[in-house]
Image: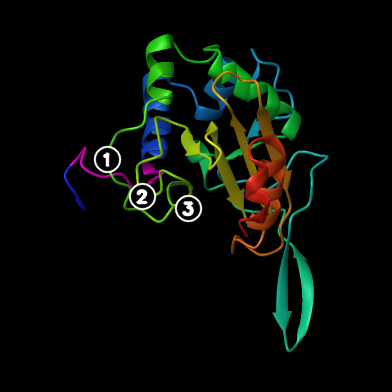
């Protein structure tokens, strides 16, 4: 162990793989089947899918993702839409901005998990954050834990606090955030070409600034 349990926080997706395996063991059904039965179908998220772990094909139609590759002074775009769906239970959903906009309020209103679990989703431990995830490295709470059970809390310079989650794969990045009272909800989905090197951050900040904190637009 890197530290005693309960003394620090670091982001680690392995726990979601374990949760997916446990779900399959307990129910006797696949993670994809349970996600469809418990969440996607009841919420009518018709454009959200859990792909087979061994099949990189995407359901039609879909937004193509590209990576810019420079060789011998020439930059070309390579289509990277077909990727191994390795994230699986850690975040391997294929979705749309419209579906995510329906999903986030459903989570906040307790339509997916019982009240006890919902409370944990909006509770962050009071410990330092020692990982590398950028979510906990910015704003007035920089250096403190920011991850709860499934969500990330972000305190903005203007005093607004939002909850949500980001995700990304080469050629794609997305995020969904809202204030706890759902008065302001933000979902974005963009296709960067920088292969997760952070070059899309300035665009994400501008989107967030328009929704939550105008001062963010000038931070980078």
How many numbered marks have been drawn onto this rendered protein structure? 3
In front: 142, or 23? Answer: 142
Q: Residue 61 vs residue 28: left or right?
A: right
Check the picture and name the quadrant holding the C terminus. Answer: bottom right
Give the crowd class for mark 3: few <14, some 14-19, many >=20 residues within 10 Å: few
Residue 80 point in image, percent of width and height: 71, 59
| Pointer 2 residue | 143
Quarter holding residue 188: top right
Per the image, label 2 sits on a secondary structure element best described as: loop
Magenta segment range?
5-14
Residue 148 point in image, percent of width and height: 39, 32
In primary-sequence order, the first of circles 1 and 3 is 1
Asked if one can make out residue 59 in the rendered structure from this viewpoint, the answer is: yes
* Residue 92 disc label: none
Q: CA distance from mark 3 to mark 2?
A: 10 Å
Q: Main secondary structure of the magenta part?
A: loop
């Amino acid at each position: 162990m890197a530290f005693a349990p309960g003394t620090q926080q670091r982001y680690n997706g392995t726990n979601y793989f374990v949760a997916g395996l446990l779900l399959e063991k307990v129910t006797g059904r696949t993670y994809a089947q349970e996600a469809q039965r418990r969440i996607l179908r009841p919420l009518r998220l018709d454009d959200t899918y859990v792909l087979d772990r061994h099949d990189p094909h995407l359901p039609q139609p879909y937004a193509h993702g590209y990576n810019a590759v420079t060789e011998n002074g020439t930059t070309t775009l390579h289509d990277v839409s077909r990727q191994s769906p390795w994230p699986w239970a850690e975040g391997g959903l294929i979705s749309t901005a419209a579906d995510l906009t329906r999903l986030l309020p459903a989570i906040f209103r307790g339509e997916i998990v019982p009240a006890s679990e919902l409370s944990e989703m909006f509770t962050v431990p009071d410990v330092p954050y020692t990982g590398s995830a950028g979510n906990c490295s910015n704003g007035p709470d920089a250096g403190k834990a920011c991850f709860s059970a499934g969500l990330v809390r972000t305190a903005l310079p203007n005093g607004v606090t939002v909850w949500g989650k980001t995700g990304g794969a080469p050629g794609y990045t997305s995020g969904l955030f809202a204030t706890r009272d759902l008065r302001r909800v933000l979902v974005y989905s963009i296709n960067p070409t920088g292969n997760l090197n952070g070059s899309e951050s300035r665009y994400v900040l501008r989107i967030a600034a328009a929704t939550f904190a105008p001062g963010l637009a000038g931070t980078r």
